[in-house]
Structure formats: structure tokens, C-alpha cells
Amino acid sequence: MTVESRLDQLLDSTQAYAPVEDAMAADRRKALADVRNGHAFLPPHEQLGLDPYAQARHDQMLEESYEQCRKITAHYAKTFYFGTEFFDEPKRKAVWAVYAWCRRTDDIVDKPRKDTTSLRDELADWTERLRLIWQVHLDATSAPQQMD
């Protein structure tokens, strides 16, 4: 029995949740399969490199996103947040972002619901958002480098 079919079976059962390890393993396998099958690549987005205003807006949005992640971490994990103050700034921001993502995932799974349909839909949406994040990352890192 595959992990995906086991996960479907768990979601269809009377349980209101699936073990997170199984769900994460299935998501990782799907993301890796997407990459191997070429479904994770889009044409390179060159606007940021050509338009300094677009780059500035991107940088501003990224900083705003890190600030939201910082607020989430500070609110929900006070001691953990304090510990991040010992990291350098790039690592601290990365840890805040990972914590905020994990916190959101945990909130989706732990939210009370009457049936598993909404859980399945929310997890599918969250999985798609994660896939798109990796897709953009792969596009950016796989774009051909120009020689000067």
C-alpha cells in the first residue's frame, strides 16, 4: 500500500486527522516526482533583473513577509523566539519563516471540523502553495546565467 493510498484511507476513516509524518512524506514524494517529471519548471522570470522598481518592490514584500513571520513566532513561541535572537539576521529570518509555515500547517490540521472534506481541501491548497514556492525557487536557481 502506498503512502498516498494510506493517507486517503486515513482521511476517509472516522479520524479527523492523518499522522503528520505520513502526510509530509507523501507531500515530499509528490514534490520530488513533480521535479523529476518536469512539472516544476516555468520559463525564467526576468522582470526583476531588468526593472529596478520591480526588484525594490520584491525586496519590500520579502521584508514585510519576514516581519509577519517574526510576529507569528514572537506571539506563539516566546521562548523559541528569544532563542532566535542569538542567530545572525539571515538565519533568524529563515527560522521565523519556517516556524510560521509549520505553525500554519499545525493550525490547519488541529482546527476543529465536522468532516474530513474541509481538512482534505485545506491540506490540498496548502500543498499546492508549497509546490508553487518550490517551483519558483527551482525556476530561479535553474535559470541560465548570462556571461559578461
Image: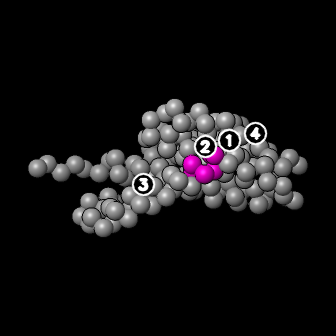
Q: Helix, strand or loop at disc 4?
A: loop
Which residue extends farthest left? 148
> Does label 1 or label 4 sit earlier along the sequence?
4
**Mark number, residue 77:** 1
Crowding around mark 3 (Cα neighbors within 10 Å: few <14, some 14 to 19, many 20+) is some
Crowding around mark 4 (Cα neighbors within 10 Å: few <14, some 14 to 19, many 20+) is few
Q: Are marks 4 and 2 in contact (CB under 8 Å)?
A: no
Dot 4 amino acid type: Pro
Give me the C-alpha separation between circle 1 and circle 4. Answer: 23 Å
> Does label 3 or label 4 sit earlier along the sequence?
4
**Magenta range:** 69-74
Dot 1 amino acid type: Ala
Crowding around mark 2 (Cα neighbors within 10 Å: few <14, some 14 to 19, many 20+) is many
Circle 4 residue: 19
Give me the C-alpha separation between circle 3 and circle 4. Answer: 28 Å
For the question of whether residue 2 can be seen, the reply is: no
Residue 43 place in picture, x, y as percent: 33, 60
